[in-house]
Amino acid sequence: QVQLQESGPGLVKPSETLSLTCDVAGYSISSGYYWGWIRQPPGKGLEWIGSIYHSGSTYYNPSLKSRVTISVDTSKNQFSLKLSSVTAADTAVYYCARPTTVTRHDAFDIWGQGTMVTVSS
Amino acid sequence: QSVLTQPPSVSAAPGQKVTVSCSGSSPNMGNNYASWYQQLPGTAPKLLIYDNNKRPSGIPDRFSGSKSGTSATLGITGLQTGDEADYYCGTWDSSLSAVVFGGGTKLTVL
């Protein structure tokens, strides 16, 4: 059974960099899939941040692309998110997720529990 | 403002049927598969439908999906109080090279 678990600071100061990690259990990242990050501001809808393939190729939301870096560490079986120059608008629950099939970026059937990140001084 | 448009809310009585619409455009819904998610309060989204009309293992057949042109529809029959949740549509946008979601629809079972 594949399981995802997000981790990272729950509080980040404005203008600093938000850093989160998603640990993958029950499946080797090296075997494939586009591993994704999605966020949800309080009381609002879902927003896709980006995805990374095990080879390191990345796809980013155009609206966040200038501030986002997603990386993968196959030796630790985890992938990470960095979002720079954060503001209060980046306050959200951040989820990592995996799509249903190896060739797809969307249709996420496996999700982490989510981690709340608040941007505040 | 979301790329995909959903009604903010829908409602129906227990046992009845409800549909949720999701409208997009050619680069997204028009040329890619639709997915639907259910999100109960305080929990991660759960995939209900993928590839327009396929259900993951464990999803009851009360949930169905369809797509026509640039719009997709989620159907739920035999409504239960436990179906009260937010529902989101999603797809790939070939022009943006990005995953896009609808703004979400809150289902109330009266």
Image (cartoon, rainbow, N blue to C red):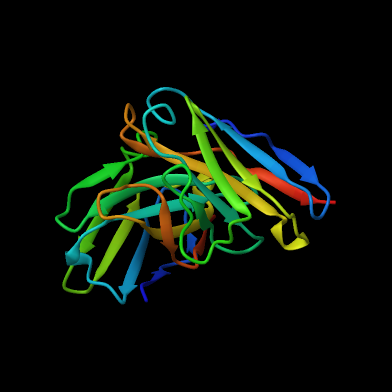
Rendered location of residue B45, percent (x, y) = 54, 57
Q: Residue at x 68, y 54 (%)?
A: B85
Q: Is residue A111 left or right of residue B83?
A: left
Rendered location of residue A56, percent (x, y) = 17, 53
Q: Which of A105 and A44 is in front in this view?
A: A105
Q: Which residue is drawn at 42% across and 26% down?
A: B30
Q: Which residue is drawn at 49% across and 48% down?
A: A90
Q: In this view, does A94 lie to the left or right of B93?
A: right
Q: Nearer the viewer, residue A25 or B12?
A: B12
Q: How many marks?
A: 0
Q: Nearer the viewer, residue A92 or A33?
A: A33
Q: Is residue B24 visible?
A: yes
Rendered location of residue B69, percent (x, y) = 47, 24
Against A82, is B35 above or below? Answer: above
Rendered location of residue A77, percent (x, y) = 23, 71
Q: In this view, does A34 lie to the left or right of B86?
A: left
Against A118, is B76 above or below? Answer: above
Residue at the front extreme, as displayed = B61
Q: In which quadrant of the rendered image does the N terminus of chain A lie?
A: bottom left
Q: Can residue B3 be seen in this view?
A: no
